[in-house]
């Protein structure tokens, strides 16, 4: 499979996958239901992973993905092929997941479209100086559950940007298309998400280390007492 990378805008995508998607989309528009079944098989796991990170609930994620595929099928004629099909499908899944999240929490969440921060707030040098970055922590298998729980502390707009960019590996441009926003807005949300996660994880591990040190100290005191007895 041929891969083309554009260094200028840091965008990387699979040409083969994009062409396969378009072929399936064209077949679907001509009434081939089996072609849409192939689309579902291709994207089911990817969309479920995103939905579960957003909703933090397996049943809600399954419902969101099912609703997303149903909406995509019903509105396939509106896909004008100006962007990648995967981007269009991800956008539907993200929106369905956020709707599920708002509905089940019985309160109004911050819409993904609303973003009060200005592009000038983005400071890439500070992000580059972090060590380790939250996305690097996520790569460690034993810490995935920890980060997954901390992700729920983020505003939905920040959480989704982090999930798409740092977990799913979409480029800033692809993420911006999914969220229907600018690249600068994505970078700002991503910076804020990484900063918040860094704070949450630092606090988490500091508490964990304190408990471990206290436990070690108690064991040490016990050992000293036992030695003096003998």
Image: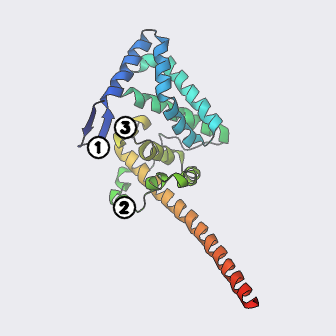
Q: Nearer the viewer, residue 208 or 115?
A: 208
- Neighbour class for label 2 at 10 Å: few (<14), some, many (≥20)? few
For the residues labelled 2 and 1, the Cα–Cα distance comes to 19 Å
Query: Is label 1 in a helix, a strand or a loop?
Result: loop
User: Which percent across, then down, holds residue 104?
Assistant: 66, 38
Of the two numbered discs 2 and 1 in the rendering, the one whose residue sits closer to the viewer: 1
For the residues labelled 2 and 3, the Cα–Cα distance comes to 23 Å
Q: Is residue 82 something one can see in this rendering?
A: no
User: Which percent across, then down, holds residue 73?
Assistant: 50, 19
Report the quarter where the C terminus lies: bottom right
Q: Which mark is first along the chain, 1 or 3?
A: 1
Residue beneath label 1, please? 10
Report the quarter where the N terminus lies: top left
Labels 2 and 1 touching (C-beta < 8 A): no
User: Which percent across, then down, holds residue 82?
Assistant: 33, 25
Q: Looking at the image, is 185 positioned above or below residue 207? A: above
Residue beneath label 3, please? 174
Q: Is residue 9 something one can see in this rendering?
A: yes
Q: Looking at the image, is 14 positioned above or below residue 9? A: above
- Neighbour class for label 3 at 10 Å: few (<14), some, many (≥20)? many
The residue under the point 65% across, 43% down is: 107
Residue beneath label 2, please? 126
Q: Looking at the image, is 227 positioned above or below residue 155? A: below
Q: Quadrant of residue 87?
A: top left
Query: Is label 3 in a helix, a strand or a loop?
Result: helix
Labels 2 and 3 touching (C-beta < 8 A): no
The residue under the point 51% across, 62% down is: 199
């Amino acid at each position: 499979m041929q891969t083309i990378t554009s260094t200028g805008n840091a965008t990387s995508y699979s040409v083969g996958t994009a062409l396969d998607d378009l072929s399936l989309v064209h077949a679907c528009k001509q009434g081939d239901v089996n072609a849409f079944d192939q689309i579902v098989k291709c994207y089911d796991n990817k969309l479920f992973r995103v939905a579960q990170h957003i909703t933090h609930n397996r049943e809600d994620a399954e419902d969101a993905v099912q609703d997303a595929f149903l909406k995509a099928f019903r509105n396939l004629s509106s896909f004008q092929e100006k962007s990648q099909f995967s981007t269009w499908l991800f956008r539907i899944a993200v929106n369905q997941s956020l709707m599920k999240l708002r509905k089940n929490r019985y309160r109004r969440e911050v819409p993904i479209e609303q973003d009060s921060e200005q592009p000038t707030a983005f400071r890439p040098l500070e992000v580059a100086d972090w060590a380790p970055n939250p996305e690097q922590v996520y790569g460690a298998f034993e810490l995935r559950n920890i980060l997954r729980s901390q992700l729920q502390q983020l505003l939905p707009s920040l959480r989704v940007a982090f999930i798409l960019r740092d977990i799913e590996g979409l480029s800033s441009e692809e993420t911006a298309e999914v969220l229907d926003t600018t690249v600068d807005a994505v970078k700002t949300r991503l910076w804020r998400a990484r900063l918040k996660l860094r704070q949450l994880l630092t606090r988490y591990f500091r508490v964990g280390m304190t408990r471990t040190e206290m436990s070690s100290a108690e064991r040490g005191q016990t050992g000293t007492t036992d030695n003096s007895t003998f």
